[in-house]
Image: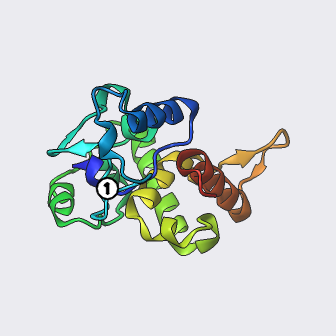
Amino acid sequence: MCHAEAVTPAAAPSTRSTCARARSGRASGCPRSFFPRPGYTEEGACPVLIGGRCTIYEDRPLVCRTYDCRIYAATDVPPDRADIAAQVRRWRFSYPGAEDRELHEAVLAAARFIREQSACLPSEAARRQPVRVATLAVVAHEKFLPGATIGARRRPVADRDRVYAVAYANEELFGDG
């Protein structure tokens, strides 16, 4: 289901080569003709999703390898698709230790911050994509941990540091900062 989301893959070198191989038809047998234009289908689906299956699974981009649709439940970001939302409502989290709960609270705080601070995501398209908000919350959560510090002097993390961290992660993962 996650591959049906319209998300530009990470800009990491491994992803760029995966996407290049996919566009040229060399990734796991993906047909060259499947890429009439760069990006996603008119329905918003991943261009390598055929018949509900990922055609480049073994060579999939970093963002696809790292996250799945459970990030919606973990971040409390509502997905924009009913079939994914139904699955998300079933997931529950347990916390074996206090640190686990603290980490989850930091992810939730990051998601709230990203939704409230439009400066984190420079493009309007990025702000409209729940999967981006959820992914970026997971990536940037450390800046939202209680007592988080930054730099050699270990100063407390300020909101501007959080904005920079989210914007940087957006550029690294999605390439449109």
* Vertical side of 120 occupied by 39: above or below: above
Q: As rendered, which of 51 and 5 lies closer to the eye?
A: 51
- Determine crowd level at label 1: few under 14, some 14-19, many 20+ residues with C-alpha closer than 10 A: many
Residue toward you, 104 or 130: 130
Residue 84, image x, y percentages = 20, 58
Q: Which residue is mark 1?
A: 5
Q: Position of residue 56 (x, y in %)?
A: 31, 32
Q: Is any part of residue 143 visible from this angle?
A: no
Q: In screen coordinates, is 78 left or right of 119?
A: left
Residue 160: quadrant of the picture: bottom right
Circle 1: residue type: Glu
Residue 93, placed above or below residue 85 = above
Can you name the residue that lies furthest to the right here? 153
The residue under the point 80% across, 42% down is 151
Image coordinates of residue 149 in percent, x first then y, are 71, 47
Name the image quarter holding the C terminus.
Answer: bottom right
